[in-house]
Image: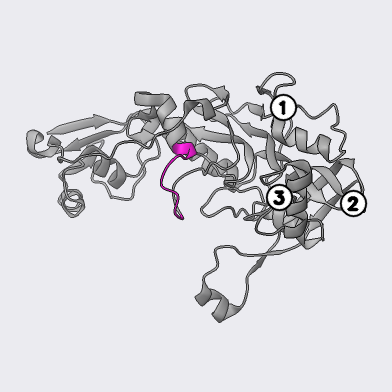
Amino acid sequence: MLEFRISQDDDGLRLDKFLKRTLSNVPTSHLFKMIRVKKVRVNGKRCKPEQHLVKDDVISIRGDEQQLRVEREHTAPPPPKVDLNDLKVLLEDEWIIVIDKPSGMAVHTGSGITGGTVVDLVRAYLGPKATRNGFTASPAHRIDRETSGVLIVAKRRPSMVHFTDVFTKHTAKKQYLVLVKGKLPKPSGLIDVPLAEHQQTAESRARRGVNMQEARTRYQVLAQTSQVAFVSCTIETGRTHQIRRHFAAIGHPVVGDSKHGDFPFNRDAKARWGLDRLFLHSTKLEFPHPETKERTLVAAPLPQALAEVLKRAGVVIPASVEVAGASAVGHAAKAPRVPVEPEHDADDDDDSDETEG
């Protein structure tokens, strides 16, 4: 008989997922049969595949131990090559690693992206420590490939569970630095424009029309010229490309946006100011820490390349904006203990986490 005690890292994990990971050679159908015929018990009691395990639960499995523990033979593909010089760590502890993601790097594979992602970079950096009790370090949320800035990677399963709840309930506060075309009519404001659901299927659109979702972006103008506005933004909802779509909707597209932007203006900005990327940077992220629940603030300075673009465009960078190279690369600190009101209607990037714009 095999016996396992559930650790803190597996607290909340479903029984069937624990068994699939622990007895990887046993077919899934056989695992379910073992549960049905009571060969698997939790704390000596009958159990169900979907039940959630709790720390210190004891899982007992009747059967031939040697046969159950045999591993399948397989050849793992070599990990993608990455350059660890691309990794800028802003904060790291036993629970999380927070990085300053460079523009142009995807968070993970998909849509033709096969390697060189944040996932590959962080796992290469962590080495053997990337996996702990069956969980491998993974991003806790997303920002777009062309967006730079603060990104959290969960190092433990409870951390990932924690941040799934945080980003679903919008109890994290995110601030972005953006350059938009034109002169904004007000020094600050709220863009409250519903956006079409990004993940709605063609079948759903045909049956009930386009599903519009509420979306709110607050902004404050930090500097203004006759051609562009340098803006600080916070989002109250997490729609796909929200910041980019919102500023495009009010006639002030984000400079360098190749999807929702003003293409002639982008070409001019590249020729005159040397802007060769999307001007959107996740500069601050405040969140409850997964272990202590203390409000934690992590900041990533404005990339030097974007600061140079601002100077060439005649934009005066306020003293409140930290620029990479001008001082510390980044910082993390406990934020003031103030109540954070949950925000509504969580919906995000391509999956179930938040995206910036």
Q: Secondary structure at mark 1?
A: loop
Residue mark closest to the camera, 1 vs 3: 3
Dots 3 and 2: beta carbons under 8 Å? no
Q: Dominant secondary structure of the magenta stretch?
A: loop
Residue beneath label 2, please? Answer: 183
Residue 280 picture quarter: top right
User: From the viewer's perspective, is 71 left or right of 238?
Assistant: left
- Which disc number belongs to residue 256? 3
Sequence-earlier tag: 1 or 3:
3
Q: Amino acid at mark 1?
A: Arg
Q: Position of residue 12 (x, y in %)?
A: 40, 39
- Which disc number belongs to residue 223? none
Q: Position of residue 226 (x, y in %)?
A: 92, 49
Sequence-earlier tag: 2 or 1:
2
Q: Residues within 10 Å of mark 2 (few under 14, many from 20)?
A: some
Q: Amino acid at mark 3?
A: Gly
Residue 281 picture quarter: top right
Sequence-earlier tag: 3 or 2:
2
Region in magenta: 111-119
Residue mark closest to the camera, 2 vs 1: 2
Residue beneath label 1, please? Answer: 337
Q: Position of residue 175 (x, y in %)?
A: 72, 39
The residue located at (81%, 43%) in the rendering is: 231
Q: Residues within 10 Å of mark 1 (few under 14, many from 20)?
A: few
